Amino acid sequence: MTSSGSRSFRSAAARRHRDNNWWIAELDRIDASTGAVQRIAAPKLQMNQPRVSPDGRTVAFIGGIMSDFGSVGGDVYTVPISGGDPVDRTPAYRGSFTSLLWGRSGLVASALIGDRNAIVPFSAAAAPEQPIWSAPVSISAGDARFARTANGRSFAFVEQDYEHAPAIYAGAAAALRKITHENDAWQPLVTVRSLTWQSGPYTVQGWLLAPRTPTGGKAPMVTSVHGGPAAANVPSFVWQGTTADLARAGYYLFLPNPRGSYGQGEAFTRANIRDFGGGDLKDILAGIDAAERAAPIDDSRLGLMGGSYGGFMAMWANTQTNRFKAIVAGAGLSDWISYYGINGIDQWMIPYFGKSVYDDPDPYWAVSAIRTIKNARTPTFIYVGERDIEVPPTQSIEYWHALKAMNVPTTLVIYPGEGHGIRDPEHSLDVRRRTVAWFDHYIGSGRAAR
């Protein structure tokens, strides 16, 4: 990022190539004429969204524990352009900052605060003020979550939620109005409730999606665990994909944001350090109890699914509880020790585990589903991309092999040419069909059960 009239660039940069080094990037100043690089700061945790003040004297960035590049959340820090120790401007803030803009009208950020996205201005002393806008929706506008006019009086972004398709909104923060109407014809497939519940020391939030055409009586529910773990389930219009397919088939869907998620501040996001599958699984199970109190859900017909970190949670939960009757695990991690040695992004693990697997293997083995595989009872459909370097397919093969040895019903599909995420339309459709068929077979919705 550059400031007005500047002859240098500010960049988050790593000394070596490849995605793995994003987790150990530093903040640099690069002279535009000579290419000389000067270190501004080297934060201990991840950083994103570097922004230079209009006077060119200060850099602001979002810093925190971030497990995926592009999934941004944390506190707002500032550091002099000449270098120094970054200062946390939002300590103990009960939300996660997700993007920054810094222009002549001042520093302003987007933040996820509980179940609401917000726009938060900062004072001249770089302290956060009260939000000038918030709503239980998702917003986006390119690299930042929102755009702002030079005078700071008007904003624009794309807004959506579970029941309303994306549309552009613009105007003063207190009087935003809908600008586009091309998606107005889309009808919602679900109704939604934001739920909160107590789990240990935390008040946890999640979303309960109900089919608009329920089958009558108690219905099955599928819990979907987000990836990350530093991420969050946030409102996104339900119109395609597995969520839409399950809603059409009559399933409730529960989308929790357990400890480790964004939305409640950096301490909450860091609360699953050295505790993968512990407190976060307790949060999810307590959330299912809350969902059952809020809706006619059949506790004997619960399903679980997730991808990446959510895939780990699906594999792990199978060895920790028999509450789920069907599981779908995408690109999951079954053995953290073997995973450390075969993945292409091992740097993300150090802040969570404290040391490498070679220096301290015990915490890695403690949360490996393979260690407790003899407890697994739940039928599991497993899928993964052939070329996934983030969670290589051998993790899924290892888990599938173990379930077969335990005589647990299981199916494994490895999609050729796919990476960390199934993107080919034919493969994506195949995952969706297999997922719904798996849940129909074991916890059937009553509409499509067989």
Image (cartoon, rainbow, N blue to C red):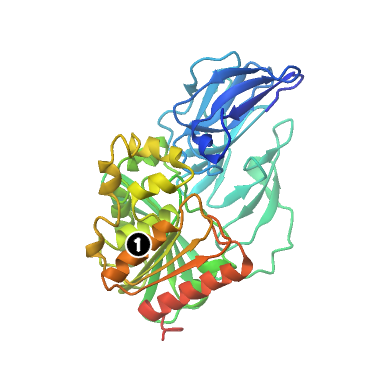
Residue type marked 1: Tyr
Residue 148 location, quadrant:
top right
Q: Position of residue 410 (x, y in %)?
A: 36, 72
Judge the density around disc 1: few (<14), some (14-19), many (≥20) Cα neighbours within 10 Å.
many
| Number of numbered labels in the structure image | 1
Residue 401 location, quadrant:
bottom left
For image coordinates 60% across by 22% down, the residue present is 28
196 left or right, relative to 46: left
Classify 277 as above or below 18: below
Q: Position of residue 104 (x, y in %)?
A: 70, 24
Residue 19 can be seen, yes or no: yes
Q: Quadrant of the N terminus?
A: top right
Q: Quadrant of the C terminus?
A: bottom left
For image coordinates 45% across by 58% down, the residue present is 393
Classify 210 as above or below 193: below
Q: Which residue is mark 1?
A: 399
Residue located farthest toward the bottom when viewing the structure as drawn: 450
Front-most of residues 179 and 7: 7
Classify 34 as above or below 315: above
Front-most of residues 172 and 193: 193
286 left or right, relative to 243: left
Q: Position of residue 361 (x, y in %)?
A: 28, 41
Residue 256 can be seen, yes or no: no
Q: Position of residue 11 (x, y in %)?
A: 63, 27
Helix, strand, or loop for circle 1? helix
